[in-house]
Amino acid sequence: MALSASSSALLRRLRRSSTVASSSVFRATFCSSSGSGPGPSQSAQLPSSIFGDDTEVANVPPLTTPKLFVSGLSKLTTDERLQGAFAPFGRILEAKVITDKVSGRSKGFGFVKYATIEEAEKARQEMNAKFLDGWVIFIDPAKPRQSKPAPQQDTRSSHAGFTTNKTVGWCG
């Protein structure tokens, strides 16, 4: 996918005039399962940067878990596409796109779990702010799931397991 001359000039001008701190993410690259990025058949070739250089993410804290949270996924991204995009960086134990229970489509985020923290760190550095299925994805460390508060029982019920209908009025 090629950028027009005006787009390239605009990106260069933005990059030069930007007062973005060194810790900011200023990188976007192409990674598509349709053949322009790393996949099972192209694992040696890394996605190219739209800026034409190897700008890296700076000042990112180290990972403490081999599980990554992937946000910004397309509604069409599947578990297989997610695994294919992350496979070049190490042995994947699990790649899961979180889906809606009713429609079965992606909710726009997922998780990738690697065998080691080093593999997860490499994947985070290489895949953060890349395009996957036409959408820019962002990689963060997965946080432990917080427990939900226990549901409170209705103390207004008249009998155990039964509730009374307290509707006022009658339509007949």
Image (cartoon, rainbow, N blue to C red):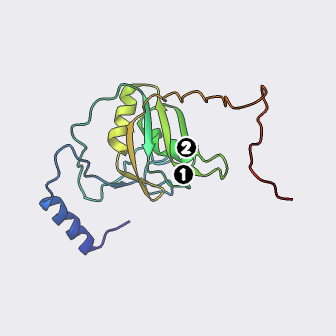
Residue at 45% in and 28% down:
144
Tell me how far mark 1 sits from mark 2, CA to CA: 7 Å
**Callout 1: few (<14), some (14-19), or many (20+) C-alpha neighbours within 10 Å?**
many
- Closer-to-camera residue (153/80): 153
Left or right: 159 with respect to 125?
right
Does residue 66 lie above or below 170 as drawn?
A: above
Does residue 101 lie above or below 93 as drawn?
A: below
Left or right: 137 with respect to 78?
left
Badge 1 or badge 2: first in the primary sequence: 1
- View extreme (right): residue: 172
Image quadrant in which you'd find residue 17:
bottom left
Residue at 52% in and 27% down:
147
Image quadrant in which you'd find residue 49:
bottom left
Residue at 35% in and 33% down:
121
Q: How many marks overall? A: 2
The image shows residue 52 at horizontal and vertical percentages of 25, 58
- Residue labelled with disc 2: 97
> Is residue 40 visible from the viewing direction of this image?
no
Q: Which mark is residue 77?
A: 1
- Closer-to-camera residue (29/73): 73
**Callout 2: few (<14), some (14-19), or many (20+) C-alpha neighbours within 10 Å?**
many
Q: Tag 2, which secondary structure?
A: strand
Residue at 16% in and 47% down:
21
Does residue 124 lie above or below 146 as drawn?
A: below
Q: Are marks 1 and 2 in contact (CB under 8 Å)?
A: yes
Amino acid at pointer 2: Val
Q: Tag 1, which secondary structure?
A: loop
> Is residue 102 visible from the viewing direction of this image?
yes
Does residue 141 lie above or below 115 as drawn?
A: below
Left or right: 107 with respect to 170?
left
The image shows residue 108 at horizontal and vertical percentages of 50, 50
The image shows residue 20 at horizontal and vertical percentages of 17, 52
